[in-house]
Image (tube, coloured by chain):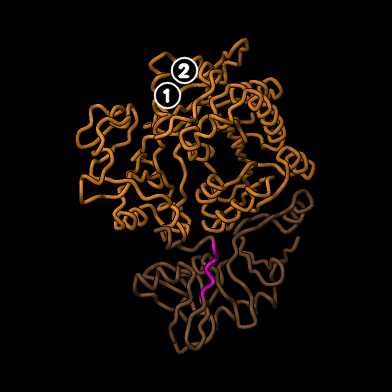
Chain colours: A brown, B orange
Amino acid sequence: MKLKEIKGKELAEIESILRKEFGIEKLPEYRLYLWGEDRIIAFTGDLSERDIWNISTIASIESLGVYIGKKDMNGIRLSIEGTHLLQSQINKNVFEITDEKMLEEWMSGADLQIATGKKGFLVMKHNEDFLGCGKASESKISNFIPKERRLKVSEK
Amino acid sequence: MPKIRRSSELQPKPLFLERMKTLLENEEDFESYMQILQVNPLVSIRCNTLKISPEKLKTRLKNKGWKLTQPFKNFPEIMIVEGKISKNNSDNPANQNNDNLYNKYNENATDTIKIKRGDITKSQNVIPLSPGELGRSLEHLLGYYYTQEIASMLPVLILNPEENELVLDLAAAPGSKTTQISGMMNNKGTVIANEMQLGRLKVLKTNLERCGTANVIITKREGSALCEKLNKAGFSFKRILIDAPCSGEGTLRSTPRGFLMWNINNIKQFSNIQKKLIESALKILNRGGTLIYSTCTHAPEENEEVMDDVLAKFKDIKIEKINLPKELKIRPGITKWNDKSYSEQVKHACRIYPQDNNTEGFFIAKLVKK
C-alpha cells in the first residue's frame, strides 16, 4: 500500500502552506494521507489505522477517501474536490471567472491567456462554483482539469 | 421525453419470450411489457447531496431550460429530466409524428401525457436533451448530480444507511449506489466498496472522485473471497449491499443488445455466482443487520431461487417486507417457477417490471439476521 497518514510535522507543514496560499485557517478533522509521493487524500471514514492495514492485507486497496491536492515545489495544488471540501475557508488567491465564454474555455481544459499579476496557484471560481486550481505565470493561468472532467465543447 | 426505438433488428429470443409470458400476469400484461421495451427509458438523475441541495440543483437546471419533475415526495433528490423547454412547439418529435408508438402508448394525451399507470408527465413543449448533454453539463462535471435510473436507486433507499456505520458494497462499480450510500451517510462512517474487474474499477474511482465521497475505501478482490477473509479478520457489518452481477434482463430498454446476449446458460451461471456471493456475505452480517440483495433481471433463478437457497442454509435469516415510495407499483416475489417451489417468505421481496412505473426492471430483497 502506497498510503501514509500525514501527521505531526508533515501535517503542520501542509496546514501552513494552505494558510499561506489560500487563507485556510484550520483543516477540517479529516485524516489526511499521502498516496505515493505527492497526492494528498482526505478520508472522513472512521476505521482505525489498524483496520485499514488489516484490509490492505486482505484485498488490494485501490483508493481511499478523496484526492484533494498535490504537493509540488511551488506549494499545494488543490483539486476540484479539494476546493469543494475547503470552500468555506478559501479567501486568498482566488481568481473569479466572470464570463461564460471564459468558463467554457477553462472547463474544456484550455489555459487562460491572462495576466493576473500573480505567480503560483490560484483557486478558480465562477459564481458559487469552485473549479479547482490553476497556476498563474506572467501571461497565463495553466489548466489542470483532468481529462475526464473536461467540457467537451466540440460535441455541443 | 422517451424516444421510440427505430430499429427492430434486436429481437428477443423465443425462450426469453416464453419465460416472460409465464412470469407476467396475463396477455395484456405481457403486451404492455413488450410495448415498453420499445420505448427508450426516462432520463433520471440523483442530486449529490454531499455537494448541493436538491432545491439549489433544481433551480440551476431549470435556469438552463431543463424541465424536471421530482416523482417522490419524500426523496426530492430524485429527479426526472423530461427534456428542455422549447419555445417552438414543432421542435417536439412527439408533436411531429402522431403515428408513433409514443403516442399510441399515450392515447389520452392532452396537455400532459401519462404513460400507463406510471406517474411521469410529459409536457408537449418539451424537447429531448441532445445526446450526451446530461453528461457534459457543468453541474455533472462538478459532481452535483449522478445520472442513474430510478429503479437502480431503490436498493439503497431500502438499505437506508446512516451516519457512522460500517457498510459493505460488495459489487460496487460503476458507483451509482456507492455514491448514494455515501451521500445518505453524509460522508460519515465508512463504506467498503469492492469491485473485482479492473476496467470497472477505473470507472468506479472516477465516479467516486467526482462525487466527493470521502468515506469510501475501494478494494479489489473477488466478492466471496473478500467476505471470507473479512470474516477471518473479525470484520462484521450492519449493512451490506449486494447489487449482484446478473443477466440484466431488466435493462433491455437501455441496452437492447442484451436481446442478442441473452442465454439460459448465463442465467444458470449467474445464479451459482450469486448464491456463493450472498452466502459468504451473510457470514459477516451483524445480528440485527440488513443485507439488501438486488439484481436488474427478472429470471427467478437469479432472484427467488437465490433467496430460497439462503433461507434453507441460514436459519437465522428472514426476508422482511420492503417499504418503497408509495408512488411505485411493485409486485411480490414468486413462489413457484417451472417445477420448483420457493419459501413463502420470498413473497416479501419485490419485483419491479418496466411497464409498471416506466423504469427498468429490478428485483430487491431485504434480508435481516435475527
Q: Decide: marks 2, 1 in contact (CB < 8 A)?
A: yes
Q: Position of residue B213 (x, y in %)?
A: 55, 56
Q: Give the secondary structure at mark 2.
A: loop
Which residue sits at x=69%, y=45%?
B196
Q: Position of residue B21 (x, y in %)?
A: 48, 16
Task: From the image, tell me which residue sits under label 1.
Answer: B33
Name the one closer to the observer, B323 or B34. B34
Residue B148, compared with residue B309, is above or below; it is: below
Q: Are marks 2 and 1 on the same chain?
A: yes
Q: Quadrant of residue B359?
A: top left
Q: Give the secondary structure at mark 1.
A: helix
Which residue sits at x=30%, y=31%?
B100
Q: Amino acid at mark 1?
A: Tyr
Residue B91 colored in magenta in the image: no
Dividing the image into 4 quarters, which one contains the N terminus of chain B? top left
Q: Which mark is residue B24?
A: 2
Q: Amino acid at mark 2?
A: Leu
Please state if A5 lies on the left or on the right of A117 as rendered: right
- Tag nearer the camera, 2 or 1: 1
Residue A144 colored in magenta in the image: yes
